[in-house]
Image: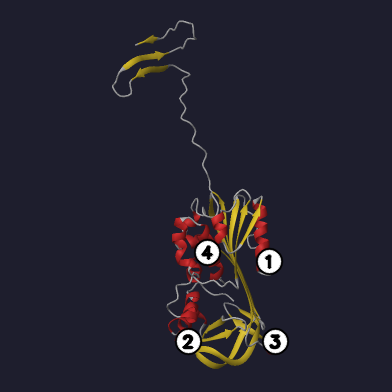
Amino acid sequence: MATRTTSVSQAFQHLAHGHETPPSIGPPILALCKSEEPVKAVSPMSVVECLRVCYLGGNDAVRKQLEQYVREPVDDKYTFGAVALLDAFPPREDFLDKLRGDVLKGPTSDAIVAAANDWASDKTHGMIKNALGAATDGTVSIVMGVVYFNEKWKMRFEPSDTVQDTFQGPHSVPVQMMKQRDDFRAFGNEKVRAVALPYAGCDYVAVVVVPQKQSDLDYAVELACGGEHRSWGTRYCDVHLPKFRVDSGLDLGESFKCMGMGALFAPGALDRMTSGVFSMDVKHRVVVEVDEEGTVVAAVTAMCAEECYTPPPPEPFLVRADRPFAFAIVHKSNNGVVLTSVIYEPSRWGEKSRDKCL
């Protein structure tokens, strides 16, 4: 169930809130991530939660670059933030006072990565069990933003109505197709059909956009959710939606740099959180499950940081007088000369020297 690198997320923002909504962080991430496989899923809310924690701990340059992104909405019901730090890198008190999240600690890189993986697994109810993978030598801090969304459909799909069907994607594959008929907000013309499926326990809706031609998905989304979003109305709909699961992983470091957040990767970037660290790697993982009951979304954005590298002091400039050398005593400014000499063979104290003054 893959989507392409499009402005899909931006268009959905228009549908939900109108054109005055600030641009979502989702589209540039989708557009900038390079992958041989189609990008399947990004959770902008998870990314923003991670950036929000980075903003609290960031220096002035980081805060300036992140300011436009941390203004995007996050929902406390679904989002969680945390930092994991080596014991040798204690968090600053001012940072802790402002942090809306958990603090994890450990004596080694392996320990804090294990703690971060366990924390993310707990917050996602086991859907993402190994978000960061194995520890990287030198990891001293981890900033995380997690989303866990688990809501039931307002109008549930009856399992007895689910049938075997064929999904016509790049390859035809068998799917379990859910079906129901009811009144929903919808939009449609000769190029696109779209429907908004409400959830029972919140104000969110699942927006499903289907182009009439497979190659027109980008255009269909922009048409249904962008400039034409005010044309939606309540209709009696016959909805066919496959059950599906998506498990998507991305490395976002280069995308963040391209989006103007390069200060995160400079020495001292997180000085308001702890001293002497800078970001090296950003991982993003999303798991989505859709069935007759509803939708579950689990997402983790994790930014790993290393200790700032302090280069060793340069080797001293060696002057070793172990061969014939010149020796003079001169005034620093008026050219006065007390002595000039050439030392061919230094004598020991108390012996006569065979060298001469000039």
Amino acid on which the number 2 mark rests in the picture: Lys
Compute the Cα span from label 4 to label 2.
Answer: 39 Å
Q: Which residue is mark 2?
A: 191
Mark 3 element type: helix
Image point 32% across, 17% down: which residue?
337
Q: Which residue is mark 1?
A: 122
**Residue 171 % position (x, y):** 59, 77
The quadrant of the image that shows the C terminus is top left
Reading the chain from its start, which is encountered first: label 4 or label 3?
A: 4
Q: Which residue is mark 3?
A: 159
Mark 1 element type: helix
How is the protein colored in the picture?
Answer: secondary structure
Front position among marks 3 and 1:
1
Residue 124 in sight in this render: yes
Residue 142, image quadrant: bottom right
Q: Is residue 133 above or below residue 334?
A: below
Instruction: Report the front residue among 71 and 326.
Output: 71
| Number of callouts | 4
Amino acid on which the number 3 mark rests in the picture: Pro
Front position among marks 4 and 2:
4
Image point 46% across, 30% down: which residue?
317
Compute the Cα span from label 2 to label 3.
Answer: 30 Å
Compute the Cα span from label 4 to label 1.
Answer: 21 Å
Q: Which residue is mark 4?
A: 52
Compute the Cα span from label 4 to label 3.
Answer: 40 Å
Residue 134 in sight in this render: no
Q: Is residue 255 above or below residue 111?
A: below
Pointers 4 and 3 in contact (CB under 8 A)? no
Pointers 1 and 2 in contact (CB under 8 A)? no
Instruction: Report the front residue among 80 and 30.
Output: 80
Reading the chain from its start, which is encountered first: label 4 or label 1?
A: 4
